[in-house]
Amino acid sequence: MKLAFVKMHGIGNDFVLIDNMSRELHLRGEQIRLLADRRRGIGCDQLLVVEPADSADADARARIFNQDGSVSGQCGNGLRCLAAYLRDAGIVTGEYVAIEAGQGMVRARLADEHVVTMDMGMPRFEPREIPFLADVQADSYSVQVGSRRLEIGAVSMGNPHAVIRVDDCESTPVEELGPAVQAIEEFPDGVNVGFMQVLDDSHVRLRVFERGVGETLACGSGACAAVAVGRTRGWLGAQVLVTLPGGELTVNWDGVGQPMWLTGPTQRAFEGNFEL
């Protein structure tokens, strides 16, 4: 079977988009892993399957899968790329796009040909909603990670995130600490781990070790999670430039009870057919 695809990325965070508006395609886990494989397949951080929306208020629905075939509830950069794809494909003709993803709906504004602003919804700090095993909600938690005791912030952006403030992103052993934090029992569904260096109240550096993927060049929900934790701790203001290994994203958040807005570029890399 020849499978048509489009490859896109948001500052290096890359995605394979599959059009399943006919609902005829049913991908198995091993097929998703093959498509995501950078040597034997197309290669991507996440795969997005585009389907008709269940709600009349949405333009499309996205099912999101990680490299290892597991389901991802949220993907900020992927959904920004999908918004641009929907306009390019003629599925959406206006300035605004509504996409069902996970258990909710996100909205995007197509600022120009490449820049997309996404409403990422409200960050959720209640431990049961992350999920994170804690008796009470707190701005930070002390957890045992191997032989180390680390202070983390925990938040859901539609997927679970742990955020750790570091002095220097570049020298932080992300490949060691990322899997170690993911393995702790406090996150029963796994977790994306962000390592944030605060430069000032409007600029941070960030590296993210993603659940089911590993370290990526960028992570939209991770950027939002970092700002959410940093703002509740009093480190950051309402608009923050987030510098990731692949480039820069801007996060705007007016505070608790308000949605977060993620802005950045999108790019179509190539398209084709894959023999599946």
Image (cartoon, rainbow, N blue to C red):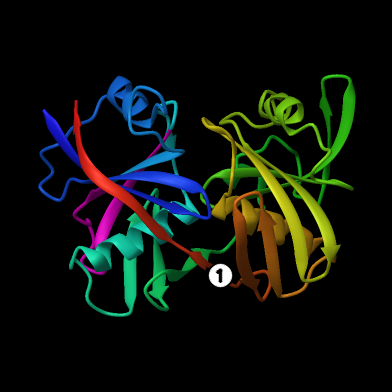
Residue at image x 79%, y 31%?
173
> 131 left or right of 232?
left
> 114 left or right of 221?
left
Q: Quadrant of the C terminus?
A: top left
> Is residue 122 among the parts visible in the rendering?
yes
Q: Position of residue 74 (x, y in %)?
A: 47, 49
Residue type at mark 1 is: Pro
Asked if residue 19 lies in the magenta stretch, the reply is: no
Q: What stretch is highlighted in magenta?
A: 50-66
Q: What residue would you read off at disc 1? A: 259
Q: What element carries label 1?
A: loop
Residue at image x 66%, y 38%?
132
Count of numbered circles in the view: 1
In the image, 234 versus 204, the foreground residue is 204
Question: Is residue 109 shown above or below 25?
Answer: below
Residue at image x 56%, y 53%?
221
> 135 left or right of 208?
right
Q: Where is residue 165 in the image (x, y as percent from the top left)?
A: 83, 48
Asked which quadrant contains residue 171, the reply is top right
> 237 left or right of 48?
right
Q: Where is residue 261 in the image (x, y as percent from the top left)?
A: 55, 70
In the image, 71 versus 57, the foreground residue is 71
> Is residue 124 among the parts visible in the rendering?
no
Residue at image x 66%, y 28%?
182
Asked which quadrant contains residue 172, the reply is top right
Question: Is residue 230 shown above or below 23?
Answer: below
Asked if residue 57 lies in the magenta stretch, the reply is: yes
Q: Position of residue 240 (x, y in %)?
A: 70, 69
Q: Quadrant of the N terminus?
A: top left
